[in-house]
Image (cartoon, rainbow, N blue to C red):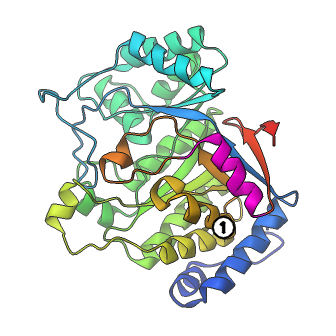
Amino acid sequence: MSAINIKRMTIDEAVDLIDNADLKTLGKMALERKIELHPKKVTTFVVDRNINYTNICWVDCKFCAFYTHERKEDAYILSFDEIDKKIDELIAIGGTQILFQGGVHPKLEIEWYEDLVEHIHQKYPKITIHGFSAIEIDYIARRSRLSIEEVLSRLQAKGLSSIPGAGAEILSDRVRDIIAPKKLDKDIWLEVHREAHRLGIKSTATMMYGTVETTREIVEHFDHVRKLQDETGGFRAFIMWSYQSDNTQLKRELPTIEKTSSNLYLRYLAVARLFLDNIPNIQSSWVTQGSYIGQMALLFGANDLGSTMMEENVVSAAGAKNEMNQEEMVRLIKDIDENPAKRNTAYDILERF
């Protein structure tokens, strides 16, 4: 679908579908669109590992149960040797990517990050470094008195390949002011990704829903992503997941926020597939939804099961304990008569099953 040849879905139309459409009808529409984009019915996944290099963070997002402060007993910064061990374990199971992000450490500057990226890239040249969210990039720039472009360029020169979409949450400053008042605003998140794309650094777009947002704010988030993709073409995929409330400050402050349903996840996912006509890949969030809703998502527009996620610390700290290995992913994909394939970060196919 293109804006030139086919009338695009509007914000009002998307809101109406989410609020009023029959769930089965939504699934059918999204699956048809997915098959148009991926007619060979290949469903992909990546074997990777999340490495959270530090849990120290000054941003204090109310929905996060992972972070701590610098002087707390559980605070850490991983040594290069500890990171190497984690990468060695990933390589041993055929992994190709590290998702590298941490808390936003108040004192680390650009040179520390350059040394880290260079160390990994030189020692493990075949491992893709998919790392550092927009808020990390923005804070490194401010801490080191550099522009966002300079930070991205310097990390790219050391071996950074792509950046994740983390930190988007809902691209609404009203919502952000409630759930993460210290966090960068939506325009800076978009600007970090715009600058990355301009430098040839691809990224993903994400969304975390289920706090205080409205349906319209959900769709406006889709619209911000679609507009930036029209401008740059730099998003490889879109990933959304639901807020996990256990052990979070937000749950203590707003205990009436209820856990969102699988029905709502599938509704949002289906409409995302229909609305985001310029983003080729949509990932299923089995980590927050569980393996079987993760599988169901493949019938509601998702064409990728995301990561086997050898290590995950952030959403698990907030109560999501789902796990899945390569063999189970292959089985779930075949079970719905699709064709499983292992990919790399760039969505190149590495192995078919």
Residue beneath disc 1:
273
**Residue 290 shown left or right of residue 31 in the figure:** left
Question: Residue 337's image quarter?
Answer: bottom right
- Rendered residue at 12%/30% (across/down): 72
- The amino acid type of the residue labelled 1 equals Arg
Q: Position of residue 318 (x, y in %)?
A: 30, 52
Which residues fall within the magenta stretch? Answer: 324-336
Judged from the image, the secondary structure of the residue bearing numbered disc 1 is helix
- Residue 269 visible in image: yes
Quadrant of res 319: bottom left
Which residue is at a point 44% across and 15% down the rendered structure image? 116
The answer to whether 308 is drawn above or below residue 154 in the figure is: below
Locate the C terminus by quadrant.
Answer: top right
Quarter of the N terminus within the rendering: bottom right
Farthest residue to the right: give it.
40
Q: State whether residue 236 appears in this view.
A: no
